[in-house]
């Protein structure tokens, strides 16, 4: 799967902001500035991408196989193991689907 084809992560989104008379800075998800000002937006965007990748790797976000059907989906972290289709599926009796772990 290509990176441009993946959905944006729901958590830990770094952003690039322009400060008047200072340049561009990168802010963390809490709004704190995590870079020194640079006059070049592309440098700030490259740093933003690198910091976002590191945060995603630390939280173990990324492509993951579903425990139920085996389809590859974009997981939001180690806690997210079922694809959206299997997560919302109900059995005939109206009970939530319980995944079967294959050995």
Image (tube, rainbow, N blue to C red):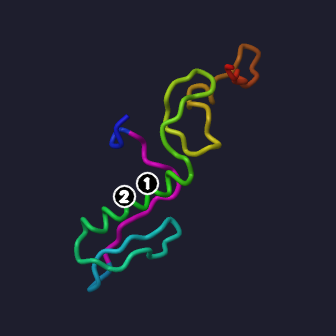
Residue 71 picture location, percent across and down = 51, 24
Q: Residues within 10 Å of mark 2 (few under 14, many from 20)?
A: some
Residue 84 picture location, percent across and down = 56, 31
Q: Residue furthest front?
A: 103
Residue 1 picture location, percent across and down = 38, 34
**Residue 67 as seen in the image, left or right of residue 45:** right
State whether residue 61 is above or below residue 23.
above
Please tell me in which quadrant of the rendered image residue 34 appears.
Answer: bottom left
Inter-mark Cα distance, 1 to 2: 6 Å
In the picture, the quarter occupied by the C terminus is top right
Residue 88 picture location, percent across and down = 62, 28
State whether residue 70 is above or below residue 59.
above
Residues in magenta, as a range: 6-18
State whether residue 78 is above or below residue 65.
below
Residue annotated with mark 2: 49
Q: What secondary structure is the stretch in magenta mostly built from?
A: loop
Q: Residue furthest bottom?
A: 21
- Residue at (47%, 68%) from the top-left corner? 28
**Residue 25 as seen in the image, left or right of residue 62:** left
Secondary structure at badge 1 equals helix
Nearest the eye: 62 or 103: 103
Nearest the eye: 73 or 19: 73
């Amino acid at each position: 799967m290509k990176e441009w084809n993946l959905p944006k992560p729901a958590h830990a989104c770094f952003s690039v902001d322009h400060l008047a008379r200072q340049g561009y800075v990168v802010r963390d998800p809490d709004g704190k500035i995590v870079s020194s000002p640079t006059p070049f937006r592309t440098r700030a965007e490259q740093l933003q991408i690198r910091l976002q990748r590191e945060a995603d790797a630390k939280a173990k976000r990324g492509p993951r196989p579903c425990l139920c059907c085996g389809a590859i989906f974009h997981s939001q972290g180690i806690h997210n193991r079922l694809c959206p289709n299997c997560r919302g599926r109900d059995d005939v009796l109206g009970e939530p689907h319980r995944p079967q772990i294959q050995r």
